[in-house]
Amino acid sequence: MKKDWVATVAINSRDGSKRRRRRRNIEETERDEMKQKEISFDFISDFVITNFRFTCTTFLESFLFFFDQNLSKFSVSTYTKMGIKTHEMLPSASPEELKKILQSLASDWGDVIDDLDSLQVKPLTGAMTNEVFQINWPTKNGHLVRKVLVRVYGEGVDIFFNRDDEIRTFECMSRHGQGPRLLGRFADGRVEEFIHARTLSAADLRDPATSALIAAKMREFHNLDMPGPRNVLLWDRMRNWLGKAKSLCSLKDAKEFCLNTLEEELNLLEQELPQDHQEIGFCHNDLQYGNIMIDEETNMITIIDYEYASYNPVAYDLANHFCEIVADYHSDTPHILDYSFYPGLEDRQRFIRLYLSSAGNQPSESEVDQLVYDAERYTLANHIFWGLWGLISAYINKIDFDYKEYARQRFQQYRLRKATLLNTNNDPLVQPK
């Protein structure tokens, strides 16, 4: 659900709960909207830091925070029309030290207003893994605003992926010109280049023209030459998540979601899904609308947020994208999936034909049909993948999102589609309540 944010950020020493976030959506806001929604720093409370060190070279080249261990954290209280919510943000510094840091950054740019009261911080809605903030520096001439993105890593999410691998992927993608540039890192997050583009909406994924752009971009993404072995990660990752789910879940949930038999389902899928002819590429693995941005002047697509990216069958990544078309993480019920929006056969054929032809070669109908067939079968793996993610998240994530119901829907879709796609008995993965 989109919210208008009109808030004052207060730096204080209290720990707080995280605000409601949706999955991985970072919204671009026009400057006139920003004036209505801006949040200014208000240094009103005292707190203590030990052994803080800061080093900064030219900001556009490097923005580096170095923190010693055992730092306290400050929280950010956001006043919205929905009430007061408190969020943890960054490792803290004293008010005076923080002022000096921000003033140093302002002086590096040279053309920004050297007044902390003018600094604007806007929480961006939609991310389900991290806290994301847009930082704005108004310029002295009043016609330009310098912007960066601050990403604060979510607590507990390292259970899903290796953060060091994700950072290496981000840096490599940046070198490939595929996403925002990395400006610097700090203990619990990083600073990124702000991309002047619009994040897609749920409806955009169903727009034929936009869908064609996404298909071509996916092909380009899959063809990237990334470091490391080109090994399929999908099955090992799901088995690892299954072990995590078993260790976290109550007996009631373990029974409802049939965790004791899920290993057999994974073995079956790995055996039944295509092996010999499958194409392996560098896959995003989470290509929902919030991770896709478009420059509406150039129609250039940018794919962002690579936490789950790895080498996998490209059919799996296509399956994931098709499954995401049923989601709207900004609705009043963001956990509810509407499968009436799932793309029909002709839509999937059109998308995959565009995907295959984007490299300049016209695919045969048999090539299109084969990849459509493979992608549809890989939706089964995708349902288990995000079903496990939802179940684990219900135990480790305090975001106001019904992860368990989301997981329930994904497992139910696996049950409903398994018999048709694998020609096996439709044994329920989720027992009736």
Image (spheres, rainbow, N blue to C red):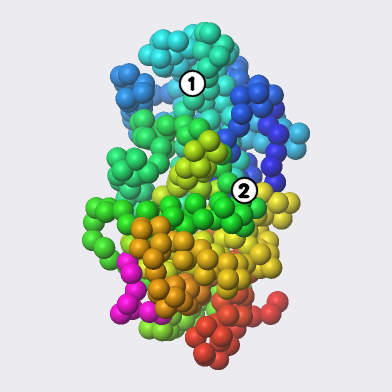
Between the C-alphas of marks 1 and 2, the distance is 25 Å
Q: Secondary structure at mark 1?
A: strand
- Residue on which the image places disc 1: 146
Residue 197 picture location, percent across and down = 52, 36
Closest to the observer: 349 or 374?
349
Question: Does any portion of residue 41 appear in the rendered image?
Answer: yes
Q: Residues within 10 Å of mark 2 (few under 14, many from 20)?
A: some
Residue 142 picture location, percent across and down = 56, 11
Amino acid type shown at disc 2 = Ser
Q: Upstream in the sequence, badge 1 or badge 2? A: 1
At 36% from the left and 58% from the top, the residue drawn is: 360
- Indicate the quadrant containing the C terminus: top left, top right, bottom left or bottom right: bottom right
Q: Magenta part of the protein: which range?
A: 273-280
Asked if 109 appears above or below 340 in the picture, the reply is: above
Q: Secondary structure at mark 2?
A: loop
In this rendering, position of residue 212 left or right of residue 430? left
